[in-house]
Image: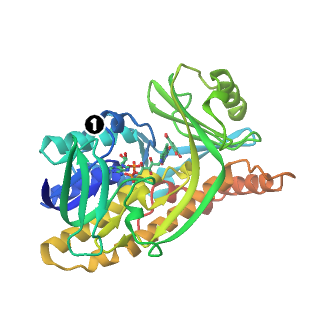
Amino acid sequence: MSERTQVGIVGAGPAGLVLGHLLHGMGIEAVVLEDRSREYVERRIRAGVLEQGTVDLLKEMGVGARMEREGLVHEGVELRFGGRGHRIDFVALTGGRAITIYGQQEVVKDLIAARLDFGGPLLFEVEDVRPEGIESGSPTLRFRHEAVERELRCDIVAGCDGHHGVCRDAVPAGALTVHQRDWPFAWLGILAEVAPSSDELIYCHSERGFALHSLRSPELTRLYLQCDPYDELDSWPDARIWEELHTRFATDGWSLAEGPIVERGITPMRSFVAEPMQHGRLYLAGDAVHIVPPTGAKGLNLAVADVRVLAEGLERFFSTGDQSLLRAYSDTCLRRVWHTQHFSWWMTSMLHRMPDDHDGFQAKLQLAQLDYVCSSPAASTSLAENYVGLQL
Ligand code: FAD
Ligand code: DHB
């Protein structure tokens, strides 16, 4: 079975779905191929912080109505260290910008509903997707769907298939340069059915390691703990998780409310960039081509920023034949990617206990940096403008 489209999009995560919707608004045809089921992608719990620019884009695209109703606008965060909290006021420091707490899976649900509403092609549970001929003028995506072998001929392929997808590997060996760091710790994340213990996020540095208090709704708290990258969930029974959270967050006059844990997972931490982000007619976006450690809450926002640039390039190309924006795609995106890599690396280095810090030297440097960030308007502003999203 052979079919044709203008843009073949691999992956129905935030990158692929936002790209599909932007292209629909521009009158460009696309087919989205996803190897998981709809239920699976709609339930996958990941990020929760949307930058102002991401929120504005989702609204402009007409998929922001539920986010506007249910999302929680946060005007600042707390940095807690040495047993004391310090607030960073985003709105005051950035001329009115803020973040919105709205789960990634909710964004994904809204985008899937919007795509299916207008009858946009979106196939779930496709198997064995193979991008071929990416160096030619007419690449193809071969795959199997409902036991039928299919071939989708495209003008352009967008690889939005995450870090473990197939598109990055379709680029010939040697054409991509990889820059990578694996961090010597991971995050244990839980979702608990209990009202948040604070209205705002708390990023906490402690002698026992990093902890993060976040939320999803007035009834759901999201919490993270720095753990060993080789830890298994079995070694973290509920009692140990709560005890560790109480100890790390301890401060006078505040306590953490406990509730039933309804979801849990361990996420390894990696910094990764493959460049350039394009080869022939294949354009890579989001986690397919870069990964940041989660401490700056940037992964999802960076994926959205990539496909916004890509959609503009594709619109120019399909409407006029002019390839200049597409040629600039990788360089344009990489500027933001490396700024964001730096911010995520800096937040991660400042807040986590370093396993090799035997004499406590690094912990002292971290505390000095945290003290500086909270006492210098210049340093607080730097954190705030990066956190709400750089206007590049
Ligand atoms: P993805 O969301 O990974 O989407 C890629 C899609 O492609 C998926 O639906 C996948 O099923 C599909 N796919 C993969 N291979 C194929 C294939 N061969 N064929 C077809 N489809 C395929 N960021 C934060 O800011 N804060 C967090 O707390 C946070 N937690 C995270 C926890 C985990 C476990 C992970 C993995 C990531 C987390 N992130 C977090 C990062 C953030 O979720 C990602 O940056 C974001 O999902 C990137 O979106 P994407 O669309 O590029 O990739
Ligand atoms: C959340 C995740 C993050 O990585 C982060 O830095 C802040 C909040 C969250 O899932 O709510």
Q: Residue at x 58, y 46 (%)?
A: 268
Coordinates of residue 98 in the picture (x, y in percent):
43, 49
The quadrant where residue 323 appears: bottom left
Q: Residue at x 76, y 49 (%)?
A: 355
Farthest residue to the right: give it. Answer: 359
Left or right: 325 as drawn, with respect to 50: left
Is any atom of residue 101 visible in this view? yes
Left or right: 368 as drawn, with respect to 66: right
On whether ligand 2 comes within 8 Å of the CB at mark 1, the answer is: no
Coordinates of residue 73 in the picture (x, y in percent):
41, 41
Q: Residue at x 16, y 78 (%)?
A: 321
Name the residue tied to disc 1: 66
The quadrant where residue 319 appears: bottom left
Q: Nearer the viewer, residue 359 or 87?
A: 359
Coordinates of residue 226 in the picture (x, y in percent):
65, 41
Q: Nearer the viewer, residue 76 or 165?
A: 165
Quadrant position of the C terminus in the picture: bottom left
Image position of 280 with respect to 273: above or below: below
Q: Secondary structure at mark 1?
A: helix
Farthest residue to the top: give it. Answer: 260
Left or right: 7 as drawn, with respect to 76: left
Image position of 312 with respect to 69: above or below: below
Q: Nearer the viewer, residue 81 or 346?
A: 346
Number of numbered tags placed on the structure image: 1
Q: Residues within 10 Å of mark 1 (few under 14, many from 20)?
A: few
Image position of 72 with respect to 1: above or below: above
Left or right: 368 as drawn, with respect to 13: right
Residue type beneath disc 1: Arg
